Image: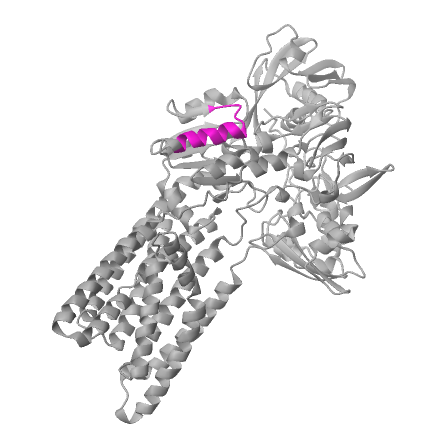
């Protein structure tokens, strides 16, 4: 509806439309003074390569960061909890910058010292969007460093969780175990080459020395590197469950025992190379899996959402106070766009509280002085004052979060098909070993031990574990590359087994950052649109703000006698014409006010001429996503919002989909439980805390987020919102996982049969074992990586 007659002028810094508020500096134009200031700052310090690396890479600076927003960083207690190192001169701090998006950001942020000489160095971790800054604390404060970042458009996101943050990393012990196994394996192979190629009888003493060294090198592998397999096997046996680590642990012990016997008795060199090699490769597979999803935390709590400190009013002053120190009776000053961290009573100001993250309700709720406000809402209006009733640990948000925790007895069971397959494979191997023992008992007693141990060694199901570990690890890597992050490899199988998808609406199918506005009624002239926009601009109600942004703007219009009726609408004269916009009751008091849609009515010169209908903007390709899913799965929609878009959703999902509105967290949880009781395998896809219980109750909980490093409820997977349309490809890749593992396992069985041919005869030589074991492992690695990459390529991932 906006005029296209004027060519848009694009800001040289951030690339946004300058509109009528254009600011010119030489050949450059800027949309606001903030963008001009950043450009000037970079230009003065010789950092304009920032603009040559990428076209208009800056972050819009129309909204200035509130003065004193980071005053809490002057508090020594908070500062000590945030910094990672300080020695009286140097201070190291790590900050999360969600605005990072391109190589220009990398260039600018790693050159902070050129903007302020008191900064010693800055290093950016681009994938994690984190910057590590080293500065001289005697010359510049932590607060000043953070404010410098804000001044160039990179405001750090600092939450209460940063006070006790532990970075998710691969287990240091696992890395050490892998390193020890790798070192020992390499040296054992090196010392075994003369054995493979044959030594002259004259070199018998040297051969015994090599064998003894191999024995010594195998001890760290057995007693340290292989610990994980023994521990897992013991736990599974105690729980009367045979997992894949049990037969592997047996094979490692048998291999080591027979090898020691051969070396000590002088009858052979043993199989230390095979044992250490297979332990090394299996540990490498585990590290690959952990490295893939270490970037994210899947068990986030409310601390990731709460601010680190709030302003408490004391003796007429705003005192930044750490959140854990807030007590009932304190009065908090809550600014625009700030979270309400506690339950309390509104004591001053008018509140427009966005509870969408907690309840799923899309529209802000208006509150008057004396009304109760609950933790988890976000103030979208001007400053308010709040009298604390419940401290953080007893707030509504905290109680809602804690409800999602399952009882300790409700332990997750690993139902991977790999363990089931391994169980039957182990039974077959033990049967073959038993048959071989019986045969040689009858024919040649001296070959029994040799035949049985050889069968257990060569038929170890390590190939199955290798194929599973490396396939899962590579698929986790491919999914992570496409911004779909899984908690563990088990989640791949769980997704493949799902037969029912349950969607939240607000924030999941729709974007929380954009609304579609449609006008119905008498045609509006361009001047009338400008007048309505000018009136809407006078109010900070979210619908008024959205309408003002949508309509064409003019700085020449005059608004007079403006009046706002709380929760109803606004009115006033714009260039001499009386205009009112608001609810149906406000525009037409005698009309029936029952309606589900979000509508703003327009009255011009006391006559209603039309209405603006607000609808949430559905994400990219959501139509094709639902079409694909409903042809293969059962679907449901659970929304905490009103039924305004019920007709559209019914058309989108079809008549066989259950669509429910006004759903509380309890309703969603009970719905999931009902589906579970009917035997459904459920994937719940949601974004807010109101979905947290349902996400945990389902077989697979997928949290949708606009930014994967920001707060999300505890879940099995985290999916960036812009990638939701790729869900069908992700599902197909997960389903291909089992086929790839089975194919590689079948190949390993071919190798096992070849090895067993020699083993049951009791004459398996070290050379044959040395060839078979690496050949099997290398083939598996090539098949798993090649097949999973080929499938991903065919799915365009």
Q: Which picture quadrant has residue 114?
A: bottom right
Q: Is residue 389 toward the left or the right of residue 475 in the image?
A: right
**Observer able to see residue 159:** no
Determine if the magenta segment contains residue 278.
no
Taking the spot 76% from the left edge, 50% from the top edge, the residue there is: 73
Segment colored magenta = 660-676
Nearer the observer, 153 or 521: 153
Total marks placed: 0
Direction left: furthest residue: 443
Quarter location, residue 60: top right
**Magenta span has 674?**
yes
Q: Position of residue 647 (x, y in %)?
A: 46, 20
Work out which residue is located at the far right of the displayed protein and give it. Answer: 315
Residue furthest top as drawn = 590
Residue 241 visible in rendering: yes
Figure check: 165 above or below 674: below
What's the residue at 62%, 11% (across, down)?
A: 609
Residue 385 x %, y %: 77, 31
Q: Residue furthest bottom?
A: 202
Q: The N terminus appears in which quarter of the rendering?
A: top right
Of 15 and 223, which appears nearest the observer?
Answer: 223
Residue at image location 78% in from the left, 56% down from the top: 141
């Amino acid at each position: 509806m906006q005029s296209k007659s004027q060519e848009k002028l694009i800001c040289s810094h951030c690339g946004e439309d300058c509109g009528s508020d254009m600011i010119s500096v030489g050949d450059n134009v800027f949309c606001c003074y903030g963008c001009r200031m950043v450009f000037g700052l970079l230009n003065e310090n010789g950092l304009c390569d920032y603009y040559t690396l990428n076209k208009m890479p800056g972050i819009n600076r129309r909204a200035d960061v509130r003065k004193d927003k980071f005053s809490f960083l002057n508090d020594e207690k908070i500062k000590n909890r945030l910094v990672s190192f300080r020695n009286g001169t140097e201070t190291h701090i790590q900050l999360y910058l969600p605005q990072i998006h391109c190589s220009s950001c990398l260039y600018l942020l790693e050159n902070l010292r050129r903007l302020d000489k008191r900064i010693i160095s800055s290093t950016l971790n681009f994938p994690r969007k984190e910057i590590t800054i080293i500065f001289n604390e005697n010359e510049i404060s932590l607060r000043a460093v953070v404010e410098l970042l804000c001044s160039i458009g990179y405001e750090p996101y600092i939450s209460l969780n940063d006070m006790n943050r532990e970075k998710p990393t691969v287990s240091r012990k696992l890395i050490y175990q892998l390193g020890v196994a790798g070192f020992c394996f390499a040296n054992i192979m090196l010392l075994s080459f003369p054995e493979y190629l044959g030594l002259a009888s004259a070199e018998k003493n040297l051969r015994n020395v090599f064998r003894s060294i191999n024995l010594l090198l195998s001890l760290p592998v057995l007693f340290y590197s292989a610990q994980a397999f023994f521990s897992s096997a013991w736990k599974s046996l105690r729980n009367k469950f045979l997992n894949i680590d049990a037969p592997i642990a047996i094979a490692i012990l048998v291999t080591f025992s027979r090898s020691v016997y051969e070396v000590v008795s002088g009858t052979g060199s043993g199989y230390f190379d095979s044992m250490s090699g297979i332990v090394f490769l299996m540990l490498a597979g585990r590290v690959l899996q952990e490295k893939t999803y270490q970037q994210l935390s899947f068990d986030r709590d409310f601390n990731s959402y709460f601010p680190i400190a709030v302003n408490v009013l004391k003796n007429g002053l705003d005192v930044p106070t750490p959140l854990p120190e807030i007590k009932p009776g304190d009065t908090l000053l809550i600014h625009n766009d700030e979270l309400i961290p506690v339950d309390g009573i509104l004591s001053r100001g008018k509140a427009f509280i966005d509870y969408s993250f907690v309840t799923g309700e899309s529209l802000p709720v208006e509150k008057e002085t004396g009304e109760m406000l609950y933790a988890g809402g976000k103030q979208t209006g001007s400053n308010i004052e709040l009298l604390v009733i419940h401290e953080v640990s007893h707030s509504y948000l905290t109680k809602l979060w804690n409800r999602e925790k399952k009882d300790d007895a409700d332990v997750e069971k690993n139902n991977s098909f790999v363990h089931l397959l391994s169980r039957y494979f182990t039974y077959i191997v033990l049967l073959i070993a038993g048959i071989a023992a019986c045969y040689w008992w009858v024919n040649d007693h001296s070959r029994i031990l040799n035949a049985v141990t050889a069968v257990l060694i060569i038929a170890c199901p390590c190939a199955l574990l290798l194929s599973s570990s490396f396939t899962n690890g590579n698929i986790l890597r491919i999914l992570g590359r496409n911004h779909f992050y899984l908690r563990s490899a088990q989640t791949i199988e769980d997704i493949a087994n799902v037969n029912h998808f349950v969607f939240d609406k607000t924030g999941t199918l729709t974007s929380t950052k954009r609304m579609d506005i449609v006008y119905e009624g008498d045609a509006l002239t361009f001047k009338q649109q400008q007048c309505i926009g000018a009136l809407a601009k006078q109010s900070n109600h979210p619908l008024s703000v959205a309408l003002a942004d949508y309509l064409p703007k003019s700085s020449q219009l005059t608004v007079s006698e403006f009046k706002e009726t709380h929760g109803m609408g606004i009115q006033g004269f714009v260039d001499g014409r009386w205009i009112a916009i608001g609810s149906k009751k406000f525009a037409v008091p005698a009309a029936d006010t029952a309606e589900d849609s979000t509508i703003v009515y327009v009255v011009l010169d006391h006559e209603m001429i039309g209405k603006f209908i607000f609808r949430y903007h559905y994400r990219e390709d959501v139509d094709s996503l639902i079409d694909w899913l409903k042809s293969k799965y059962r679907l449901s929609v659970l929304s905490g919002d009103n039924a305004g878009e019920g007709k559209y959703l019914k058309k989108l999902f079809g008549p066989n989909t259950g669509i429910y509105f006004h759903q509380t967290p309890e309703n969603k949880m009970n719905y999931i439980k009902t589906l579970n009781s009917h035997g459904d395998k459920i994937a719940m896809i949601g974004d807010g805390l109101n979905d947290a219980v349902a996400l945990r109750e389902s077989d697979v909980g997928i949290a949708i987020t606009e930014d994967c490093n920001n707060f999300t409820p505890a879940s099995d997977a985290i999916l960036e919102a812009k990638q939701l349309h790729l869900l069908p490809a992700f599902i197909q890749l997960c389903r291909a996982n089992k086929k790839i593992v089975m194919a590689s396992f079948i190949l390993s069985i071919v190798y096992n049969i070849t090895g067993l041919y020699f083993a049951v005869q009791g004459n398996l030589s070290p050379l044959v074992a040395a060839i078979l074991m690496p050949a099997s492992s290398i083939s598996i690695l090539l098949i798993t990586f090649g097949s999973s990459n080929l499938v991903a390529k065919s799915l365009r991932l």
